[in-house]
Amino acid sequence: MLTTLRAALSLALLAGFYVYALVVAAASVSLALLLGGLLGYNKLAIFLVIAGVLTAVAVVRATWRVARAKYVPYGLLITEDRAPELWATVRELAAAVGTRPPDEIRLVPEVNAAVSEDNRLLGLRGGRRYLYLGLPLLQAFTVAQLRAVLAHELGHYSHQHVRLAEPVYRGRLLIAHTMAQLSRDRTWLTRWVMRLYAYFYFLVSMAVSRAQEIEADRASVRLAGRSSAIQALRELPGLSAAWNFYLESYVVLGKDTNLAPAGVLSHFTSLLEGRSKELAEIRASAPSARRSWWDSHPSDAERIAMMAREPDPSVAADERPARIFLPDLDAAAAELEEVTFPFEGRQRVSFEQYVAASLAASYQKQADRVYRSLARITEPTFPTLGTVLDLLAAGRADELGATLVPAGSAPEVIREATREAVWTTIVAGLCAAGAARWQLSWSGPAVLVDSTGKEIDHQQLVERALGGQATEVAAELTATGVDLAATAEKATIDFSDAQPLAALLNVVVNGKRQDLLILDKGLMTLPPAPYLL
């Protein structure tokens, strides 16, 4: 009963949000004009009138944009002839929870499943319905676990429990979109005034949402079985962590190169197999019990405890891999990655080639920075890998490290900078000479190997170079084909895509008056421009 009352209040607040928006707009103009009249339309009054009009315009424009916004679905459309069993299962589950099935099923590159609508009448009426299904779920889940997730998502639109929850759910999304529009207008007063109402709506509606999540979880248990529903919920945190790690550590590794890996989405299964132990540890850990008043979901611990108390229906767990729902899953993954990732003409290579080239480029970029910094103490000669080893042999390791850190840095900071400089320049030299390459590993970090595939102990080379054997290390590197005369691949920084942060005008640089431009990549001096005094 309490949840129904909260839902009714949320629905009234949803309608009131837009009435409130119009009142704020009208009040802003009226108050500004009134103050303008009282103050005699001096500069302060004119400023207040302009602020009031801008506030009104911002509110009306944001509301109008959201009301007229056309819903644009994303992802890869999966037709019924391509996945007949998936469509049949979705229709079966929709009928079981008492809602209409989606009009479209779309595959998305996310660890998520969701049902969304092209809302009408400011969220009070639903339109075309879309089911978004994350590719990683099809790659990692069983049929029973995916049924549990689908039953849960369709349960958000169920009329069997809280009848007003469906428009409340739409309304929460709609108000969030309106506030996002307001944030683009950069009028802090408008955002502050409207945010007060939005916070109140969310505070009330989140209680409805949490109750709805519990009801959706009950639908999940009822239709997929208690064990499968709990397993699916416990799998999601680890799967999400694995997906984010995969994107950050593998997919975008070579973002600064002109390369891109082939099979971006299909290779996620390689990571799941390689990191199975870590995933098992996450799966075995205690579910999170953290929750705040603003959370739309109860904590995982609360949800799992509720599921464990539910009667266990006589539903046989289907342990087949969920990928059977989409027979041509790898082909669909290839199509999805083409519409998802901005390859922009990059050369597509195997993951093995991509990782090797990306790490080699990364170490060369770091080595370039070392060489450019070292030039401060080796001018007019530009430093090389041989220069680095010569400085170590001459006992000038601290001088090397000092060029890479701010003046006055602690000795341990300088020593660490020296170690990293030696490491990166040696590795970059080995890769540039073809004497070493980075070998892909799905179960751990990439490994540096020689031409025969044997792992190179580059840390041992660094320790020896720092420990007084720099001359011997130089000879060994030369014997493997490394060019000790190798220097920076880019002697100067490419500022073509640098972003300006600030500028200092008419400053003295090296005894000359210059303009100093501060960029996100460094500093640039320019001839002083003529100024009007």
Image (cartoon, rainbow, N blue to C red):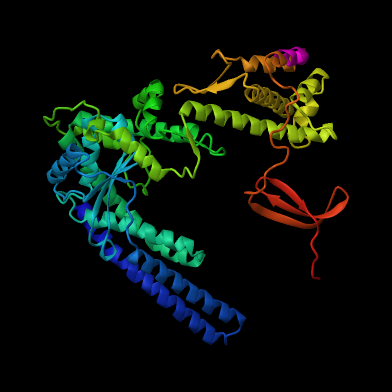
185 w.r.t. 381: above or below: below
Question: Residue 497 versus residue 343: which sits nearer the camera?
Answer: 343
**Is 43 placed left or right of 393 in the picture?**
left
**Is 514 placed left or right of 363 in the picture?**
right
Within the image, what quadrant is residue 359 found in? top right
Within the image, what quadrant is residue 436 found in? top right
Question: Residue 246 versus residue 341: which sits nearer the camera?
Answer: 341
358 w.r.t. 483: above or below: below
* Residue 235 percent coordinates (x, y): 32, 30
Residue 399, magenta (yes or no): no
**Is 38 placed left or right of 204 in the picture?**
right
Please tell me which residue is depicted at 74% across the width and 49% down the height of the picture.
524
Q: How many numbered discs?
A: 0
* Residue 268 percent coordinates (x, y): 39, 30
Magenta highlight: main SS: helix
Please tell me which residue is depicted at 84% across the width and 34% down the height of the picture.
379
Residue 475, magenta (yes or no): yes
Quarter containing the C terminus:
bottom right
- Look at the image and tell me whether residue 370 can be seen: yes
Question: Residue 308 versus residue 440: which sits nearer the camera?
Answer: 440
Within the image, what quadrant is residue 422 found in? top right
Please tell me which residue is depicted at 33% across the width and 66% down the height of the picture.
67
164 w.r.t. 351: above or below: below
Please tell me which residue is depicted at 52% across the width and 23% down the height of the picture.
446
Query: What is the magenta range?
Result: 469-476
